[in-house]
Amino acid sequence: DKKVYVREFVPKLNVELSLHELMILEAIMQHTSLSVKELRMVLRNSSKESRLSLEFLREKNLLYPKKYQDSKEIEYQINLLYLKELQSLFHSRLNRNIKLG
């Protein structure tokens, strides 16, 4: 008799996020997805800074890239595994109460 036990996956953020990084994640959440160019326009920073910030968050598995058929640019979306933890951070550190549909 062989039994297999499955433990529930509980995601944990193992990274300290700056306020700037939280603002980027919040902007992506509000817009569903953003490209480097769009993030540059939203936050009014340089293209290089936007790209590096998105890559940092992607390396931490908080974002994933997505390419739409009609778009030439890659857009980044929130990794839904960390959605509840990010919402909690938005509430506690940015005083935002984001509720999803």
Image (tube, grey):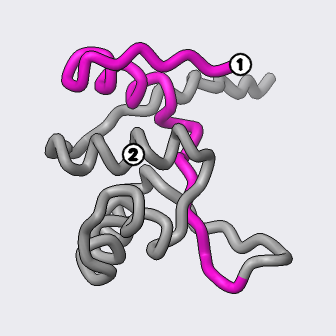
Which numbered marker is on residue 101?
1
Which residue appears at 25% of the width and 69% of the height? 45
| Count of residue discs | 2
Q: Is residue 40 magenta?
A: no
Q: Residue at x 53, y 69 (%)?
A: 35
Does label 2 or label 1 sit earlier along the sequence? 2
Q: Which mark is residue 23?
A: none
**Secondary element at image label 1:** loop
Q: Which residue bears the numbered disc 2?
A: 25
Task: Residue type at mark 2: give it.
Answer: Leu
The answer to whether residue 14 is left or right of residue 31 is left
Foreground pick, 62 / 26? 26
- The image quadrant that residue 8 belongs to is top right
Q: Is residue 79 left or right of residue 16?
A: right
**At 53% from the left edge and 38% from the top edge, which residue is drawn?**
30
Q: Whole-Å distance between the Cαs marked 2 and 1?
A: 18 Å
- Determine whether 54 is above or below 81 in the image: below
Q: In the image, which residues are magenta? A: 72-101
Residue 40 vs 96, above or below: the answer is below
Q: Is residue 32 left or right of residue 17?
A: right
* Residue 73, x across and y down, in percent: 62, 81
Kind of residue at badge 1: Gly
- x%, y% of residue 62? 43, 50
> Looking at the image, can residue 16 be seen?
no
Which residue occupies the foreground of this view, 30 or 8? Answer: 30
